[in-house]
Structure formats: structure tokens, C-alpha cells
Image: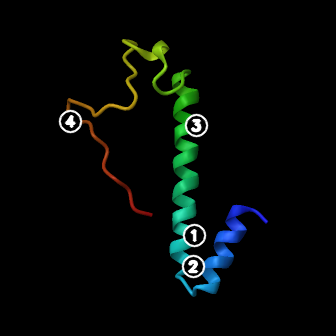
């Protein structure tokens, strides 16, 4: 069994909310996909020296107000 199958079985046994279970797993999958896509788009790994002074800064807070808020699914 995979980790997903084990987790869903545990949630069913504990009578937890299944919609919350799927929301958490969907959120994890989307975040992983977005991180991978960002790495492919920028063409370097996070904290790699290639990106230093390239104008595509990763892992820092924007200083000019273009911050993106959180999204709820």
C-alpha cells in the first residue's frame, strides 16, 4: 500500500472528515507541482549560486508590495 492509501484508511477508521483529508493531499500535490514548475521555469534550483544577482530571487520576501496572498481551496 502507498502512503496515500494508508492515510485514507487511518482517516476512515478514525471517522475523520474525508473532504479535509482530500483537501490536505490536494494542497500538498499542488504545492509540489508549483515548486517543480518554478524550478524548471527559472532553470536553477533554490539557493543555487546561478540565480545570484540574476533578478529572479527565490526564497525572499518582495520589497515593493507585489506580495501574493494565500489562496483557499
Q: Secondary structure at mark 2?
A: helix
Of labels 3 and 4, the one closer to you: 3
Of labels 2 and 4, the one closer to you: 2
Q: With 43 as the anchor, is 63 left or right in this view?
A: left
Q: Is residue 37 above or below residue 3?
A: above
Which callout, 2 or 4, points at the residue further toward the start of the chain? 2
Which callout, 1 or 3, points at the residue further toward the start of the chain? 1
Which color scheme is applied?
rainbow
Report the residue at 56% width, 60% height from top: 26
Of labels 1 and 4, the one closer to you: 1
Which callout, 3 or 4, points at the residue further toward the start of the chain? 3
Q: Secondary structure at mark 1?
A: helix
Q: Which residue is mark 4?
A: 65
Report the residue at 56% width, 46% height from top: 32
Q: Secondary structure at mark 4?
A: loop
Q: Is residue 72 above or below residue 68?
A: below
Q: Which mark is residue 18?
A: 2
Which callout, 3 or 2, points at the residue further toward the start of the chain? 2
Q: Residue 46, how many percent across, how many down?
A: 48, 27
Q: Secondary structure at mark 3?
A: helix
Q: Which mark is residue 22?
A: 1
Q: CA distance from mark 2 to mark 4?
A: 37 Å
Q: Is residue 23 above or below residue 54?
A: below
Q: Residue 49, how many percent across, how many down?
A: 46, 14
- Marks 2 and 1 close (CB-CB < 8 Å): yes
Q: Residues within 10 Å of mark 2 (few under 14, many from 20)?
A: few
Report the residue at 32% width, 31% height from top: 60
- Marks 2 and 4 close (CB-CB < 8 Å): no
Q: Which residue is mark 3?
A: 36
Q: CA distance from mark 1 to mark 4?
A: 33 Å
Amino acid at each position: 500500500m502507498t502512503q496515500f492509501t494508508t492515510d485514507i484508511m487511518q482517516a476512515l477508521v478514525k471517522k475523520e472528515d474525508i473532504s479535509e483529508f482530500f483537501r490536505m493531499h490536494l494542497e500538498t500535490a499542488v504545492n509540489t507541482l508549483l515548486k517543480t514548475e518554478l524550478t524548471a521555469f527559472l532553470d536553477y534550483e533554490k539557493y543555487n549560486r546561478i540565480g545570484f544577482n540574476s533578478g529572479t530571487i527565490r526564497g525572499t520576501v518582495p520589497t515593493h508590495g507585489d506580495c501574493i496572498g494565500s489562496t483557499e481551496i
